[in-house]
Image (cartoon, helix red, strand yellow):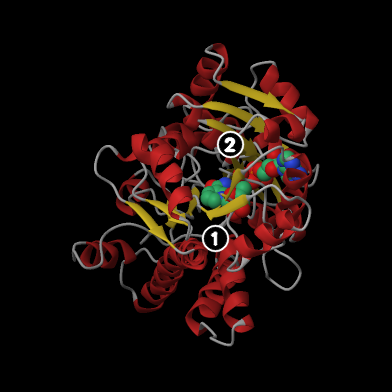
Amino acid sequence: MKIGVVGTGYVGLVAAACFAENGNSVIGVDIDEAKIKALLEGRIPIYEPGLAEIVVANVAEGRLRFTTDITTAVRESDVLFIAVGTPQDEDGSADLQYVVKVAEQIADAMNGPKIVVNKSTVPVGTAAKVKATIEGRTTHPVSVVSNPEFLKEGAAIDDFLKPDRVVIGTSDPATEAVMRELYEPFVRSGKPILCMDNVSAELTKYASNAMLALRISFMNEMANLCDATGADVESVRKGMASDSRIGAAFLYPGLGYGGSCFPKDVKAIEHTSREFKAPMEIVAAVERVNARQKTVMLPRIEAKLGGLAGKKIAVWGVAFKPRTDDIREAPALFLIEGLLAKGATVSAYDPKAMDHAKRTLPASVQWAKNAYEALEGADALLLATEWNEFREPDFAKVKSLMKQALIFDGRNIYNPKTVKAHGFDYVGVGRR
Ligand code: NAD
């Protein structure tokens, strides 16, 4: 198939590369000239495991091209994916300006019938809005599909090539047939392609993210209850997770969820629920609990150190989760800002996200070349992102580098007994 993917960010670039990998002819389009220049030179603008190899191989095979010229991409494609950002607007709703802009650009470039696919996370009614926008500017026929993306950064290639399910929102049988043909190679293992109406498809994405965020917020409150009662959240978590009705996924407490999706998507579904006068109180609570959780660790560090002025805190991890360089809404950023505001100095290290973080955080943050360098003379270590390389450090070396042997484990990756046996004072989230 001839496919155009508009937006070559975390979702669009992965989608473009994976569609090409399955033999399609794909053009990736972006307005960001630096991004396209990098891609044309064989450099991948984001860190995503396995992505570079697929992009380079498919460019070499001639199946994957990149351009800033959307007109060419529209004219040469039968199916056009919209994969641009849908950030949070001031009132919590999803800002659709980039999606609508792309719809206008597609309409103005159309040279025949097209299938336009909303891959961006968009609120109910967006497919209708995109269709109306395009039909208002061209007489060429268009069919608009809602095809939300469920990939996880850090495992995006695997998730895209082997999805748990593919959701396709369309009421047009011919369009459904084309979409099924496109996705069939991705679900050979028997995973379902679920076809439904546009609105249900649009809502499925928000419902899924809100449920995952809900599990995290639930566990964060449970961890705080464990702290208050003297229970150990790891024991409670394992006890819950062994129940097949509950399962183990997304039951890990921490410093509050971040990332480019959960925070904005939870707010957006809450906004939709209010707009349609079917308020989702539980979703509103998920958001409130998360905002509060982001503030839990800082006072603990402050109390333990007897104030933060003049103290040095080493921070391991600034990405919002491991295996990505994405720092959008990362709890580490919030905490580092808080530490600095209280007069602490911060030395930080992240395997992949430091370039992005340097552009966002104050210049006073000291950036270390490796995890151990960040510890030199530190009064405490704050583990904010559970990268694998932080899981089994040389604790003797860690202790010898630090001024005080004190660890705040924001992701509960260390065994308190082991860490204490190495002579550390340990504070986790809901841990005995
Ligand atoms: P991103 O910011 O990484 O990428 C968006 C890209 O679109 C940017 O490169 C930007 O330059 C480009 N763009 C904007 N306007 C354009 C235009 N008019 N023409 C061409 N390019 C344009 O965003 P992302 O993380 O890939 O997310 C995209 C969408 O997918 C969002 O709606 C998001 O909620 C959703 N989503 C993201 C993830 C994720 O893990 N990142 C997962 C599932 C769904």
Image vertical order of residue 81 relative to residue 268, above or below: above
**Residue 123 in the image: x percent, y percent?**
60, 66
Q: How crowded is mark 2: few (under 14 residues within 10 Å), some or many (20 or more)?
A: some
- Tell whether 50 sits left or right of 134: left
Q: Where does label 2 land, which residue?
A: 78
Among the two numbered marks 2 and 1 on one chain, the one whose residue lies closer to the N terminus: 2
Q: In which quarter of the image is residue 132?
A: bottom right
Looking at the image, can residue 343 be seen? no
- The residue drawn where x is 71% and y is 22% is 38
**Residue 139 in the image: x percent, y percent?**
73, 50
**Residue 106 in the image: x percent, y percent?**
72, 44
- The residue drawn where x is 51% and y is 65% is 206
Choose between 30 and 399: the one closer to the eye: 30
In space, the residues marked 2 and 1 are separated at their CA atoms by: 32 Å
Choose between 364 and 57: the one closer to the eye: 57
Q: How crowded is mark 1: few (under 14 residues within 10 Å), some or many (20 or more)?
A: many
Looking at the image, can residue 175 be seen? yes
Tell me the amino acid under the disc marked 1.
Phe
- Camera-near label (2 vs 1) is 2
* Element class at badge 1: helix
- The residue drawn where x is 77% and y is 37% is 31
Image vertical order of residue 345 relative to residue 25, above or below: below
Pick the quarter of the image with the C terminus: bottom left
Image vertical order of residue 345 relative to residue 297, above or below: above
Q: Where does label 1 land, which residue?
A: 262
Give the farthest residue toward the bottom. 277
User: What's the mark number on residue 368?
Assistant: none
